[in-house]
Amino acid sequence: MEDIRVLIVDDSALMRNLIGKIIDATPGLKIADKAMNGRFALQKLDRVAPDVIVLDLEMPEMNGIEFLRELKKQNIKIPVVILSSIAKEGAKITMDCLELGACDFITKPSGSESANLNTVSETLSKMLLAYGRRHQIETGTRGGEERRSISEAYKTPLPKPITGVAAEPQKEEKPKAQREPGNIQIIAIGISTGGPNALRQVFASIDKDLPQPIVVVQHMPPGFTKEFASSLDKICPLEVKEAEDGDLIKPGRVLIAPGGKHLVVEKRSLAAVAKVIDAPPQSGHKPSVDVLFESVAKEYQNHALGIIMTGMGKDGAQNITKLFTEGSRTIGQDEASSVVYGMPRVAWEMGGVMEQVSLDNMASVINRYGREFA
């Protein structure tokens, strides 16, 4: 299996070396080359043929956003992962980069805290593997067998499904809906790696008269979700905003969970509202998809549409299954269109997903469900 070639673009020699060490320590990754700014990176592209690029934002001569504009102008389709500071100005620039075609972003390690550095290292290596391998598949470097082996790398271990003649008691563990689905009153989406671009694609094609409100958890650090919501608002016919405590949950509105906080829903006598809570991470995340789905299951029972999309790990799988058992309709993104088929895979294998849908078809399916089951 061919290693994924990574081009590192950062004006800091310290960061270039740090990223290089992360790549060297990750099986399946290989340093293609390093560049101190966007201009040098452009000059190297043909020669080093990277599968994925790690890109800093603030650099002399040609910064990150100028580099992305040039890639777009030249129609160069190599996945780019942004390494960004957490400053608010950096958040705005990061969202501009996503609009220009960057795949994802990670905040740079703060200080010398080893825990923070370890988290960033693990996330970066997984992102580079995911986006780099996907690029190799799309450009024909890898075949179907390798595509399946790639998916295996992101699987969370699960008990083997019961097959064959023997009818073991474990078969009863497959969840069953406790009631028939009712009308859909709310749509809840959980998503992680690969999410920023996937949500842009979905929300650009959502019907402007969709009868249901939408609530979303996208794994994202504090300081970025407000800008992310604002960038989605520009392309979505519905209002998209970062959720604030007490926001009305109403048709025509999409609420994005704020980074570093959990989002839950609460039905009151006259209206449904968003509650933003500061509680410990759940399923390893804050915001957590499981926290949102659990509250939707509690408040809406069989009157919701739950959707779990591309992402590492299993956040959301447990409680989209709870939504299903309550009688709500549930959808998972399919393997072929997921950057990382982790969260939706676990949900599917747990029996919590009724239907798997490609990213290209996701918006039309949401629109159809919204109309037919209003």
Image (cartoon, grey):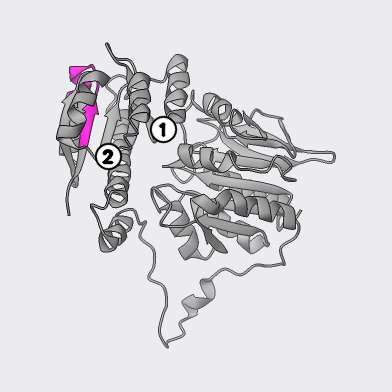
Please determine whether, in this image, residue 11 is positioned above or below residue 238: above
Tag 2 residue: 125
* Quadrant assignment, res 321: bottom right
Can you give x and y, in whole percent of width and height, for residue 142 in the image? 24, 55
For the N terminus, the image quarter is bottom left
Q: Nearer the viewer, residue 149 or 120?
A: 149
Q: Which is nearer the N-term, disc 1 or disc 2?
A: 1
Counting from the top left corner in percent of width and height, residue 217 is at: 55, 40
Inspect this view and state whether residue 155 appears: yes
Q: Which mark is residue 101?
A: 1
Seen from the viewer's position, the closer of residues 291 and 210 is 210
Judged left or right of residue 42, residue 351 is right
Magenta-drawn segment: 6-16
Q: What is the CA distance from the residue labelled 1 to the residue labelled 2?
A: 20 Å
Report if residue 276 lies within the magenta region.
no
User: What element does badge 2 sit on?
Assistant: helix
- Residue shown at 29% from the left, 40% from the top: 128
- The 10 Å Cα crowd at callout 1, few under 14, some 14 to 19, many 20 or more, is some
Q: Residue at x 62, y 57 (%)?
A: 323
Q: Residues within 10 Å of mark 2 (few under 14, many from 20)?
A: some
Q: Amino acid at mark 1?
A: Gly
- Residue extending farthest to the bottom is 165
